[in-house]
Image (cartoon, rainbow, N blue to C red):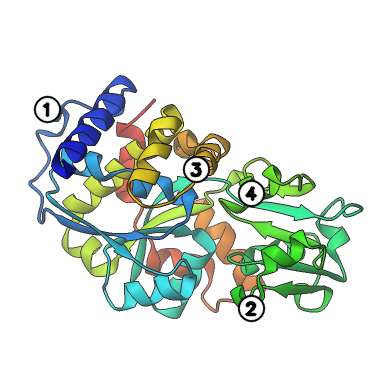
């Protein structure tokens, strides 16, 4: 029975990809060199907005991969950095500012592609209309301290002096915000969907639509430096599968959300579906990945969070040639 379900899921996703025009004929890749390896290990964490990485398994098989593993890790930057440092996985999706910090710290990662823009929403209590109004306030988050500080500095606040940021998971900052003990909360999926469902509708920043954050990739794909260097053909095919998966999340959100639940990436179908509908997965062609890295690296450098210059971050930790090739190859 498990084999039957797996085969049915594979055929369903392939049919959806074909219908959406996402899966090109094999002959389109006939001139490409053979895969250096048919194995790839992907990070698995329960963050819904990383959906393309989670639903790309069948697309990877179509690219020739036969050994596809998902490796569990805690949903924290520290755990992801440690996983790369210990070579536990080959590719992971994560927020761009975190990857910039990884490169600055010497973690062996190479940013290879942009995935999507916008997944954060900054909720605030009544009377707080914009980021400037956060001066002297208490803000909670579990995954976006750097982003809060960047937003504050962008409007002229000193995040170290003007804000109190509660990010310790043990303190349950989301619960504290819902109990009225915090003035604002920076939410990442499925938290925005939860807050909206419970009537917390005061959003002062939504990175999917509010500039300048909406003009850059929120999340990017990075590979372990050794894998990217040794396996350029496999890397390109991983990127291609990811981009097709992003298109699939946009064109078939219901089926993609079901895949997330069936694959054990999340338990809540409705929150997964709403996340896929809220985030601009189908617009990865519209953004410049190098500009994204430069933008976030500049913000982090100005805050003193990283030491390397933006250009040094790009030189040391990004290889976007194949991504840019695929943007031309996979035109809408």
Q: CA distance from mark 3 to mark 1?
A: 34 Å
Labels 1 and 2: the sequence-earlier one: 1
Q: Are marks 3 and 1 in contact (CB under 8 Å)?
A: no
As drawn, 29 above or below 115: above
* Number of other residues with Cα within 10 Å of mark 1, as a class: few under 14, some 14 to 19, many 20 or more: few
Q: Position of residue 121 (x, y in %)?
A: 67, 50
* Number of other residues with Cα within 10 Å of mark 4, as a class: few under 14, some 14 to 19, many 20 or more: few
Labels 4 and 2: the sequence-earlier one: 4
Closest to the observer, 67 or 91: 67
Q: Is residue 297 left or right of residue 40?
A: right
Labels 3 and 1: the sequence-earlier one: 1
The residue indicated by pointer 2 is 304
Q: Position of residue 231 (x, y in %)?
A: 17, 58
Q: Are marks 1 and 2 in contact (CB under 8 Å)?
A: no
The residue indicated by pointer 4 is 194
The residue indicated by pointer 1 is 27
The residue indicated by pointer 3 is 272
As drawn, 153 above or below 261: below
Q: CA distance from mark 3 to mark 2?
A: 36 Å
- The quarter of the rendered structure image containing the C terminus is top left
Q: Quadrant of residue 135?
A: bottom right
Labels 3 and 4: the sequence-earlier one: 4
Is residue 2 visible in this depiction of the protein? yes
Q: Position of residue 233 (x, y in %)?
A: 17, 50
Q: CA distance from mark 3 to mark 4?
A: 11 Å
Q: Position of residue 247 (x, y in %)?
A: 39, 33
Q: Look at discs 1 and 4 and give the one toward the viewer.
A: 4
């Amino acid at each position: 029975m498990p084999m039957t379900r797996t085969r049915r899921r594979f055929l369903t996703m392939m049919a959806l990809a074909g219908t959406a025009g996402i899966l090109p004929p094999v002959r389109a890749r006939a001139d490409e060199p053979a895969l250096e390896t048919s194995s790839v290990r992907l990070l698995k964490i329960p963050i819904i907005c990383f959906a393309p990485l989670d639903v790309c398994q069948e697309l990877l098989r179509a690219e020739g991969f036969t050994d596809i593993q998902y490796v569990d890790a805690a949903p924290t930057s520290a755990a992801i950095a440690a996983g790369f440092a210990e070579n536990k996985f080959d590719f992971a999706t994560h927020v761009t500012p975190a990857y910039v910090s990884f490169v600055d710290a010497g973690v062996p990662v190479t940013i290879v592609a942009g995935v999507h823009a916008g997944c954060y929403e900054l909720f605030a209590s009544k009377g707080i209309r914009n980021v400037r109004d956060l001066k002297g306030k208490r803000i909670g988050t579990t995954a976006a301290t750097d982003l809060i500080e960047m937003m504050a500095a962008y409007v002229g606040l000193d995040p170290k002096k003007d804000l109190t940021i509660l990010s310790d998971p043990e303190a349950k900052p989301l619960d504290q915000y819902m109990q009225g003990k915090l003035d604002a909360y920076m939410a990442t999926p499925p938290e925005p969907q939860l807050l909206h469902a419970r009537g917390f509708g005061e959003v002062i920043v939504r990175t999917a639509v509010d500039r300048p954050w909406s003009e850059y990739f929120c999340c990017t794909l990075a590979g372990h430096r050794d894998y990217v260097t040794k396996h350029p053909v496999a890397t390109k095919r991983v990127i291609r599968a990811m981009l097709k998966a992003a298109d699939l999340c946009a064109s078939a959100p219901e089926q993609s959300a079901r895949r997330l639940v069936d694959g054990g990436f999340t338990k809540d179908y409705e929150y997964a579906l709403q996340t896929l509908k809220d985030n601009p997965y189908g617009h990865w062609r519209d953004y410049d990945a190098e500009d994204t890295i430069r933008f976030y690296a500049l913000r982090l450098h100005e805050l003193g969070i990283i030491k390397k210059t933006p250009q040094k971050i790009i030189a040391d930790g990004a290889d976007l040639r194949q991504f840019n090739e695929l943007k031309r190859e996979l035109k809408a």
